[in-house]
Amino acid sequence: MREKIVEFDWRDTDLGPLPHWDATLRIAIDMMLTWSFPSAVVWGPNLNVVHNDAYVALIGDRDQALGMRFDALWKNVWGDIGPWVFKALGGTTSFVEDQPHQITCTKMGAEGWFVFSYAPIRDEQYEVVGMLHTVIPSSASAAVHDRWREQAQSFERQIARYIADRDYIWRLSRDVMITVSLDLMMIGANPAWHRALGWSELQIQGMSILDLVHPADREEVEAAAIDFVNGTGPAELETRVRHVDGHYRWFHWSGSFDGSVLTAVGRDITADREEAMRQSQILLRNTQRLEAVGQVAGGMAHEMNNLLSGISGSLELLQRRLTQGRTEAIEGYVEMARDSVQRAMSLTHRLLAFSRHQPLAPAPLNVNAHLTTLEPMLRHVLGAEVSLSWQMDVEPWTVCLDAGQLETTLINLCANAREACLGRGNVAIRTINTRLASAFPEEGGLPPGDYLGLQVIDDGHGMPAEDVARAFEPFFTSKPIGRGSGMGLAMVHGFVGQSGGYVWIESSPDQGTKVCMLFPRSLEAIPQAPAVPVPQASRASGQRVLLVDDEHSLRAVMAEYLRERGFTVSDVTDANSALECFRHKGPYELVITDIGLPEGFSGRQMARAMRAITPDQKILFITGYVDQPLEPHILDVPGTALLIKPFELSTLANQALLLLDD
């Protein structure tokens, strides 16, 4: 019968394909096949029969009973035995001696009287899923009855021992264990799961396992589950699972399938992956510092020489034409000079970002929502033949970032991705909640805590290890001459670092590139977006402005332009002179001041002194460099704004009008 059981096609029965049989069913059948008594395991809601050789000898020409319904096999006496079957399925063992049945044994060629026994079979959840049916001659001796009872009790003990062992492992295992239905719905989880991920038994009831898997891993998990159920594909998998707090942890999974329930065992490998990443980042940052300084100096000199040559040449030609009294085409020289100035402004902004001395205006931000607003612009940067996909965390943690600088960062990364894909490929942007259990990537790096990960991934030509190691150096570029200044990634590095985060690159030739950023989680509430005020007039109407800047030439052109725009301007060099004017020549509707002023008295200190006299004084800060970050609460004060040098004079006047109209 063992051979027939193996050869039988069980797919059309409740038992399903033999490789997927439940462990309890396998144990019961293995024991039943060794018994000398005619016995059968009756399993499942349709009571399918699996019997031994002695059972065949008893029922004779009905050897087609394998897989048959028990009630159909014994339909002639079902009225008598049916109640005992249901009693066994209710959990009670019965040995019915007072209702013997006459059976014709074809093999022996004679009729005999037999009594039946019914013993319930329980699964790993201690639910009754079947029964053991045993047939004993009614004339058997007491010794035979005792031997049957001993075997029946041994059967129950072995099943109970397996269930107890399995329950012991389930409860005390350090690895997480879950049971999942064929439609990937959670059935149960062991205590290690609850300890590792924080979800309670009530929370996971009725939840799909895919809801807990990281969005980037869901397709892989779904495909692996299908392959595993069908007996194909790998038996192991690594994936990320969401903690109840919102961050993700890495697990290495293996599993088993019993035909209806998938049991998966997972080992937490988060610490292992973080350590591997930490070690790789230590190697990446082990660069030659002096070589980097030389690269910065050489690149800065090269770029500024080009820009200054354009400005100088345009002004020289402009001067010659004015001296000659020729005014035709002078607008072209002005435009060439302005273009060079704009490029120089962009270069200095990127240098400030790299040096982490760029003035930032951080505010609580929902990165997912902000990325949605940036999508049209990023698609434009990538071009029509580069596909952009989003893999967003379901509930991203809030971060405190300068939204404008984040936008510039993503533009730079998407531009690099487009170049890497040669204008045709795929780019993905991911957000992921991440909890660091230890310092990252090493002591002195990011402290343990909660972070939001932001990743930009392309499937382009990738980068060799030596380029990855130098990628964040200013003016380093692997692009052809004339197709990049080498400041994009340097700016990204500076912005992320100044925001309290960390950035690294994962890439290899022909394997694409992933730029990974981690930003600290913020517990501040995201403010309601204020309506952007629009100035009602393009000119002032004589409002008094106090202008403070120690750069004489810059102060002179700013004052002249503001006067042309209708302001009444008083300009001074330092904070002491400004306070003197403020006390004796005020009031002023607006104070415009550089933050870095001479004589040890900064623009911030001067502003505090002025507001001690006039609490609602409106102040516009201007700066190109700050040795310390500007305190966020300063910009939160009504009537306060910040402009970063270099800027266009029209921008200065428009910002002044906005403040006065506020």
Image (cartoon, helix red, strand yellow):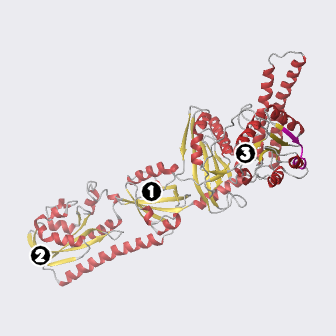
- As displayed, is residue 203 above or below residue 327? below
The residue pinned by badge 2 equals 100
Q: Earlier in the sequence, mark 3 or mark 2?
A: 2
Q: CA distance from mark 2 to mark 1?
A: 52 Å
- As displayed, is residue 116 above or below residue 536? below
The verdict on residue 574 being magenta is: yes
- What is the x, y in percent for residue 57? 16, 67
- What is the x, y in percent for residue 511? 60, 42
Specify the quadrant that holds the N terminus. Answer: bottom left
Q: Amino acid at mark 1?
A: Ile
What residue range appears in magenta?
569-578
Q: Quadrant of residue 386?
A: top right
Left or right: 306, with 240 as reference point: right
Q: Earlier in the sequence, mark 2 or mark 1?
A: 2
- What is the x, y in percent for residue 25? 31, 66
Viewer-side label of 2, 1: 1
Q: Amino acid at mark 3?
A: Phe
Q: Amino acid at mark 2?
A: Pro
- On the question of residue 36 being in view, the answer is no
Within 10 Å of disc 1 (Cα), the crowding (few <14, some 14-19, many 20+) is many
- What is the x, y in percent for residue 72? 15, 61
The residue pinned by badge 3 equals 472
Which element is circle 2 on? strand
